Image (tube, grey):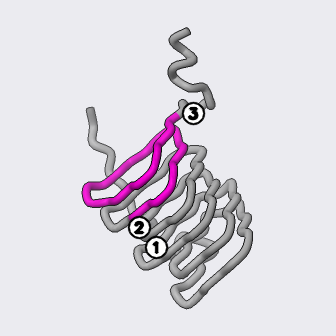
Amino acid sequence: MAEIRIKSIDESELDTVLAEDIDFVGELKFTKPLMIKGRFKGEIKATGDLYIGENAFVDAKIEANVVSLKGRVKGNILANSRVELFSTSCVDGDISTPNLVMESGCRFNGICTMKSDNGEDEKDNEK
């Protein structure tokens, strides 16, 4: 089986970056890729990809296409495509995604539920 490596995103490829000095509270909705490098508290409901920087802290319920995490998240994550946990990441909350990639050294305290891309639970296919 081939080893899957997590590829870091180049910040210049993103339309929106919430910088290190941003401390945002509220609800965030977006369709294009977004990076959080500062602090965020609230709820994220997106169809785009979410990138969380190494020094970022997010206290939120997160829903996005891809969640790529180098910093800290306190809250549940629902990713429609994939969750990527880099070695510097820490998650305190549950993860629901069809694809989870974890580097050695990351911390994850919660429950992971993995469904297939079409939304069906693998156990349902055995019936």
Residue beneath label 1, please? 53
Residue at (65% x, 57% y) in the render: 48
Task: Give the tally of numbered discs.
Answer: 3
Residue 15 rendering spot, x and y as whole percentages? 63, 73
Q: Which mark is residue 117?
A: 3
Contact (Cβ within 8 Å) of mark 1 with mark 2 = yes
Front one among 116 and 75: 75
Disc 3 is placed on an element classified as loop
Q: Is residue 74 magenta?
A: no
Judge whether 54 appears above or below 30 on screen: below
Residue at (47% x, 43% y) in the render: 112
Amino acid residing under circle 3: Asp
How many other residues sit within 10 Å of disc 3, few (<14), some (14-19) or many (≥20)? Answer: few
Disc 1 is placed on an element classified as loop
Query: Would residue 123 appear left or right of 89 to someone viewing this image?
Result: right
Residue 55 rendering spot, x and y as whole percentages? 43, 79
Front one among 54 and 74: 74
Disc 2 is placed on an element classified as loop
Q: Which mark is residue 70?
A: 2
Contact (Cβ within 8 Å) of mark 2 with mark 3 = no
Amino acid residing under circle 1: Gly
Q: Which mark is residue 10?
A: none
Task: Decide which of tag 1 and tag 3 comes sooner along the chain.
Answer: 1
Image quadrant holding the C terminus, namely top right
Judge whether 23 appears above or below 64 on screen: below
Q: Where, by quadrant of the figure, is residue 31 drawn?
A: bottom right
Which stretch did the figure color magenta?
90-114
Residue at (53% x, 70% y) in the render: 13
How many other residues sit within 10 Å of disc 1, few (<14), some (14-19) or many (≥20)? Answer: many
Amino acid residing under circle 2: Lys
